[in-house]
Image (tube, rainbow, N blue to C red):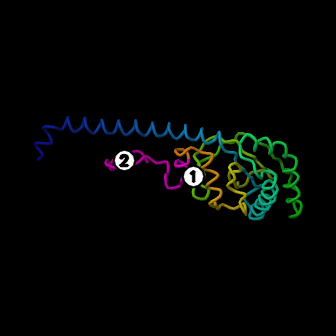
Amino acid sequence: MKAFFQKYRAVFETIFFVLILAGGCLWKYQEWKLQQTQQQIAEKVLRFHVRANSDSSKDQALKLKVRDAVGAMMQQVLEGVDDVQECSRIVEENLAAVIDTAQQAVYQEGYTYPVSAQIETTDFPQKIYGNYIFPAGEYQALNVVIGSGKGRNWWCVMYPNLCFHDAVYEVVDDEAEKSLQRVLTEDEYDAVLKSGEYRIRFKYLDFLNRFFQ
């Protein structure tokens, strides 16, 4: 057996090299495909982002109070909206109300932090929300910043409405899932399901997985 291997060693090494090269090409293709998918998804959604003043327990609790106040207000304002451009326009028109609502929530909790809010392009890492994984990349988002904005953030998807169904917690109900399905293509929707994580796996060449994790 050893002699056989030695005789055909060059052949085996060539095959192994080809497999590694093919695996690398597949990984690059999947990486490119994910980037394209992210950009397509980003064009169809508007995210909602609340940044706390700090990571202290009190500032984090305040962040959730602001989230709830702004969420309740925007749920009414955005009722019936079925287009991301319309959603962005309405949010833009109501930025002053968003800031006022958030500021009042801050004051009611006994704090004097200033609050700012604007729609802007934001670079997000990969984020899990309910049953979905949204790939890392740039997204349009309503950013609400409390104080210095240096604390951990909270986020959801404002359009389609994933966070204002009954409550603004990280639970995506059936109605919200249907909204997301209506907005995204079948491939885009499948791409963000948590079960379809963005990791390259080689079904029949398991020994290659360690190289591309």
Say whether disc 1 or disc 2 marks the residue closer to the N-terminus: 1
Q: In which quarter of the image is residue 23?
A: top left
| Residue at 76%, 42% in the rendered image | 86
In this picture, residue 138 sits left or right of residue 85: left
Disc number placed over residue 133 in the picture, else none: 1
Q: Which amino acid does label 2 sit on?
A: Phe
- Residue 112 locus on image (x, y percent): 89, 57
Kindly identify which residue carries mark 2: 202
Residue at 46 percent across and 40 percent down: it is 30
Q: Which element type, helix, strand or loop, lies under badge 1?
A: strand
Give the Cα separation between the discs numbered 1 and 2.
21 Å
Judge whether 47 appears above or below 31 on screen. below
Residue 129: x %, y % from top left: 62, 56
Left or right: 191 in relation to 173: left
Which quadrant holds residue 113? bottom right
Element at badge 2? loop
Q: Which amino acid does label 1 sit on?
A: Ile
Q: In this view, does 30 lie to the left or right of 124?
A: left
Nearer to me, 97 or 19: 97
Identify the residue at horizontal 84%, vertical 46% (top origin). Answer: 95
Q: What stretch is highlighted in magenta?
A: 189-213
